[in-house]
Image (cartoon, coloured by chain):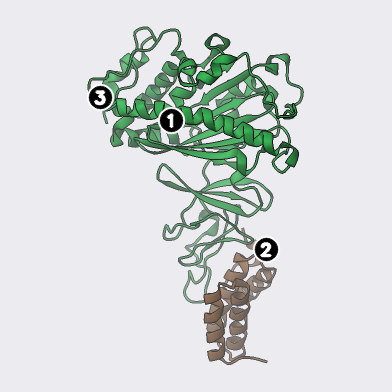
Chain colours: A brown, B green
Amino acid sequence: MTRTKSALDKALVDAHNAGNKAEIARLYEEAGNVFEADGDVDGAAFYLTHAYVFALEIGSSRADQLQERLHRLGREVPPSKEL
Amino acid sequence: MNAHNDFASVLAPIAEARGLSNEHYTSPAFFEAEKRAVFFDNWSGIGFGKDVPEPGDVKPIDFLGLPLLLARDQDGELHVYQNTCRHRGMILVEEPTNIRGVIRCPYHSWCYSLKGDLKTTPHVGGPGQNVHESVDRSELGLIEIRSHVWHDVIFVNVSANRPELEIDNAKLVERWQEFQKPVFHGGPDSSFTLDVKTNWKLAVENYCESYHLPWVHPGLNSYSRLEDHYHIEEDGQFSGQGTLVYRQLKGEEGEIFPDFKDLSEHWDEGAEYIAVYPNVLMGVHRDHMFSIVIQPKDAETSVEHVEIYYPEPIANDAAFNSLRQKNAAQWKGVFVEDVFVVEGMQRGRHGRLFDGGKFSPVMDNPTHMFHQWVARQLCRRP
């Protein structure tokens, strides 16, 4: 089930307040999905970027997939070119 | 700073020499000049590998106002970085922690791997655009400070101007070649710090001479007399003292620490205490070694970080708990006995008519050698 944007906003604020970075990454990715489904590529890239950053920070295996996804949107270097 | 007027007397042969003048111990301007000429331009001690034991461990430290970050990467390699983001200069890490992924700047979330690579630059080209043609990540990694770990002491050569540490200190490495083996920290009870109201140099000077031992450490007289000690002098590199009558510590039931393997007979009762210029004091014995990193805080205050190591991993071995604690207590007792001396000499250097001091041409040679070394560093880079 997809949450509304306002429900996502609240969940993100709660996750930030709790310092739960895995949850933050997951929720940002969910937000990216919502914007992408709406056809808002810029909005999707914005939230997927945040998901990527927090996934990187915690060493999540999702980071590679998010990087690839951002790359396909023209927003990030490809994983093969990363340093 | 213009300290050159008194260097001629410092650089004179010991019988005619005087020590460094008061200002070298009390003046903030002189202290500032030492940062670059003495510390950044040489291999200086900043900490210990055991402070970041696990992959992902990071620890921020302040080295003479320079914000540094100790980081152990996922391959176990230790790095020393400037703890400053390449974007807006934000401090990256505020507290010791373990990082599972990347170092994320708390300001705009530029992210760096533990190997120093810049991994991502979120929104750098506008919202949701993380690349820009003018932002070349390959040129914007963390600035790595040249470092080398020797006997678990982390040395840095900030100016990157010296030969490799083990070449720069080749004579010491060779001298202690028999101890060139893995060392194991003794754990929390083998670690202590002393805050001392003294210029860092006085702690070095007191450490590397044996002249004071019978007066300041009378407990040593019963078995370690002044005549059992010898000077260690390697001009331009290090100085210190050795003893010929080291006695192993024994527990109540006669237990002793394991020895370093394959030591020559010299070390049966030999031990050496050397000041590795500028600020690392090391001591080796058949069954343990210690290192002290002197952290200069300002012209008149320092912190001594003392860590004790053993040839085998006995930190968590209950059979050695009592002996390990006894050894740490014994060394702490000795170093605490020295505090009134280094603090007293510091206060004495506010005596305006003090001329740097007259050396004993027989007993103060290691100290004079250190003064000469400091003077040469300051002459080289005024």
| Chain of residue at mark 1 | B
Could you confirm whether marks 3 and 2 are on the same chain? no
Circle 1 packing at 10 Å, graded few (<14), some (14-19), many (20+), is: some
Residue annotated with mark 3: B351
| Picture disc at residue A80 | 2
Task: State the CA–CA distance, disc 3 to disc 2.
Answer: 66 Å
Circle 2 packing at 10 Å, graded few (<14), some (14-19), many (20+), is: few
Task: State the CA–CA distance, disc 1 to disc 2.
Answer: 57 Å
Instruction: Classify the position of the N terminus of chain A by image quarter.
Output: bottom right
Going by the numbered disc 3, the residue's amino acid type is Gly
Give the residue at the far left of this rendering: B352
Report how many numbered discs are placed on residues in the image: 3
Question: SS at mark 1?
Answer: helix
Instruction: Classify the position of the C terminus of chain A by image quarter.
Output: bottom right
* Residue under the point 53% across and 68% down: B131
In this rendered view, identify the residue nearer to me: A32 or B312: B312
Q: Disc 1 vs disc 2: which is toward the camera? A: 1
Residue annotated with mark 1: B339
In this rendered view, identify the residue nearer to me: B59 or B358: B358
Circle 3 packing at 10 Å, graded few (<14), some (14-19), many (20+), is: few
Q: Quadrant of residue B345?
A: top left
Q: Position of residue A64 (x, y in %)?
A: 67, 69
* Residue under the point 48% across and 52% down: B83
| Chain of residue at mark 2 | A
Going by the numbered disc 1, the residue's amino acid type is Val
Going by the numbered disc 2, the residue's amino acid type is Ser
Decide which of tag 3 and tag 1 comes sooner along the chain: 1
